[in-house]
Each structure stands twice: as structure tokens, then as C-alpha cells.
């Protein structure tokens, strides 16, 4: 048996992008099995582990009554000694409604009711699965290519880090990322938007970055935040978590949050060690480009 086999169990809302995730994982070299009854997960893993190092299983409500054994099957998998991670793909209800309307397909739990009724039934049925997931990915604001990139960012590691950290800049005007584990508000920093020279630039520009990082109390804040993160990261690793998303927000997601995110990435560069643990940190700028 291959001892270092990785097992991903992917579930989530219909219309949120499970198929896109499956294709992205296949492109990254994962062996993907779609719509498997949960009761067969353990048998499948035992069958594939001798030869497959990366196995992904897609589970959803299309399995009907078979889906009800999901939690029991995952727990049994852990008891058998198989190390696995559960990923939940989600999206806002109104986004899911628009997607189903665009494809003119009924929701699998819709029946004779409205699309929204089917979505609400599915959300309730998946509530425990989402609550127990190791990683939640919200696709509400992502197109297919952006979702594929996000999967690649998470599961195409060149090293075996103990914790994968995504630092995500965002604009509060576009909403707080629902998949964030920790949110930091950097709107206390002087806003480059009000500087005519800096306004058309963004936080990746050296002038903007310098203005943000040299603002009052920013360096002290970053040092304290870095120490706080290190404490949290060690706790996450001890609890068996493999992924952590830090969301850094400013008003529009263009200047301050981008500059702070890039600075944190520089401080938490790949290969950083915390005691006996190793972390990899990556930047995602969700709203960069949305504001002119």
C-alpha cells in the first residue's frame, strides 16, 4: 500500500462548481471518481491506494438515499487509518439560482417546486458536511477559469508543507469572503485613493506599497499580526487542518489590502518554519481590477 497517498473528498452545492473542480484535479494528476455512493469510499480507496498517490472522490446528493451515509463513511475512513481531507464547494443562493436558470436545468432536489426550494433542501441536507469540511471554497464571484486557478493554488504544491496559507486581499464594498478563516480590516491605514498620483495605481505598485507600509503604526501592526498568525497556525496544524485563508480587506480591494497582503507574503515566504512545522503562503487578490 502507498503510505503517502492523498485522499480528497469533494462535496458541495449543485451548481457551485463540483464538475469544474473535478476537471481541475484531473489536470493536476489526481485520479477522480465522480458521484460515488459514500458507503463505497473505503473500498475504493483500498483498491486504488497500491498504485494511486492522489485520489479524489466527488460525493453529492445525486446519490439519493446513499448520500445519507456520508458522515458515517468519512468517519469510518479515518478509523481505518486513511488520511483524508474534505472540501466543500459553495456559492450564494441567488448565484446558484441564476446558474440553473442560465442552463435551463432543474435542481436535483427541486421536484415540482421552485429552483430556490431545491437549493434550500440541498443546503439543509449538506449542513453537517459543510460544518465538518476541512476547506470551504466559495465560487460566487469566480468564473470557471478562476475556480480552476484556485484549485491549482490549493492542490498543486511543489513541497509537502504542514499548512497551506492563502492570503486573500478583498474590498469590503464587494463583500467579505465567506471562506475566510480570519479577516483583518486595514481600513485604518491612510487611503492612497485620496492621493491623485496614487489613485490610478494599485497595491502592487512600489509607490503605493511604500505609502501604505510607511503609514503610522503599520509596521507595528504587521509585526503583531504576524505573531498572532503564528500562534493560530500552530493550533490549526495541531487540530489537523491543512489549509488556512487569511482575508485582508480595505474599501475597494485595490490599494491597502493588496499592499498589506504582499508584505505578509514576504514575511511568510514559502518554506517558513514554525517549530517543527513548515508553511507555504500564497497571495490571491480577489477584487484587484474591479475598481478603476
Image (cartoon, rainbow, N blue to C red):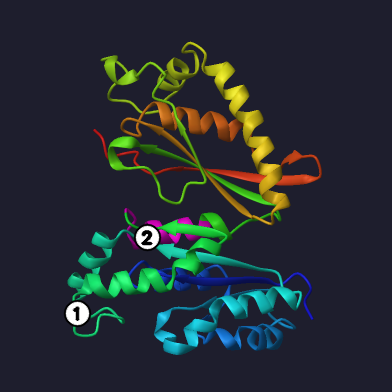
Using the image, tell me which numbered label, if any, was put on residue 69: none
In the displayed structure image, the side of residue 59 where residue 252 appears, left or right: left
Q: Is residue 116 inside the magenta stretch?
A: no
- Check the picture and name the quadrant holding the N terminus: bottom right
- Check the picture and name the quadrant holding the C terminus: top left
Work out whether 34 lies above or below 203: below
| Residue under the point 70% across and 69% down | 83
Residue 228 at what x, y percent from top left?
A: 63, 31
Question: Magenta stretch?
Answer: 141-152
- The number of callouts visible is 2
Between 187 and 110, the one lying in front of the other is 110
Between 249 and 32, the one lying in front of the other is 249
2 or 1: tag closer to the N-terminus: 1
Q: Quadrant of residue 265?
A: top right
Residue 230 at what x, y percent from top left?
A: 67, 36
Work out whether 63 lies above or below 75: below
Q: Residue beneath label 1, please? A: 113
Chief secondary structure of the magenta portion: helix
Between 66 and 251, the one lying in front of the other is 66
Q: Residue beneath label 2, please? A: 145
Q: Residue furthest top?
A: 216
Q: Mark 2, mark 1: which one is toward the viewer?
A: 1
For disc 2, the neighbor class at 10 Å (few under 14, some 14 to 19, many from 20) is few
- Residue 176 in view here: yes
- Spatial CA distance of label 2 from label 1 is 32 Å
User: SS at mark 1?
Assistant: loop
| Residue under the point 65% across and 40% down | 232
Work out whether 88 lies above or below 250: below
Amino acid at each position: 500500500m502507498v503510505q503517502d497517498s492523498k485522499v480528497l473528498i469533494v462535496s458541495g452545492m449543485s451548481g457551485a462548481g463540483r464538475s469544474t473542480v473535478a476537471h481541475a484535479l484531473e489536470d493536476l494528476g489526481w485520479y477522480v471518481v465522480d458521484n460515488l455512493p459514500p458507503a463505497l469510499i473505503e473500498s475504493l480507496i483500498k483498491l486504488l491506494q497500491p498504485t494511486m498517490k492522489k485520489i479524489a472522490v466527488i460525493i453529492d446528493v445525486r446519490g439519493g438515499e446513499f448520500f445519507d451515509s456520508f458522515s458515517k463513511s468519512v468517519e469510518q475512513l479515518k478509523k481505518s487509518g486513511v488520511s483524508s481531507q474534505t472540501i466543500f464547494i459553495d456559492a450564494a443562493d441567488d448565484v446558484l439560482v441564476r446558474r440553473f436558470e442560465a442552463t435551463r436545468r432543474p435542481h436535483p432536489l427541486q421536484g415540482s417546486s421552485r429552483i430556490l426550494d431545491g437549493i434550500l433542501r440541498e443546503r439543509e441536507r449538506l449542513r453537517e458536511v459543510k460544518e465538518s469540511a476541512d476547506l470551504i471554497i466559495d465560487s460566487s464571484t469566480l468564473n470557471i477559469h478562476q475556480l480552476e486557478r484556485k484549485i491549482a493554488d490549493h492542490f498543486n504544491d511543489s513541497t509537502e508543507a504542514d499548512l497551506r496559507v492563502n492570503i486573500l486581499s478583498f474590498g469590503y464594498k464587494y463583500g467579505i469572503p465567506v471562506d475566510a478563516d480570519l479577516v483583518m480590516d486595514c481600513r485604518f491605514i491612510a487611503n492612497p485613493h485620496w492621493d491623485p498620483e496614487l489613485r490610478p495605481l494599485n497595491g502592487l505598485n512600489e509607490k503605493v506599497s511604500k505609502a501604505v507600509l510607511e503609514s503610522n503604526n503599520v509596521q507595528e501592526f504587521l509585526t503583531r499580526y504576524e505573531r498572532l498568525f503564528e500562534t493560530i497556525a500552530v493550533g490549526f496544524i495541531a487540530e489537523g487542518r491543512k489549509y488556512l485563508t487569511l482575508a485582508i480587506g480595505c474599501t475597494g480591494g485595490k490599494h491597502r489590502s493588496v499592499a498589506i497582503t504582499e508584505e505578509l507574503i514576504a514575511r511568510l515566504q514559502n518554506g517558513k518554519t514554525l517549530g517543527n512545522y513548515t508553511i507555504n503562503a500564497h497571495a490571491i487578490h480577489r477584487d484587484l481590477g474591479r475598481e478603476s
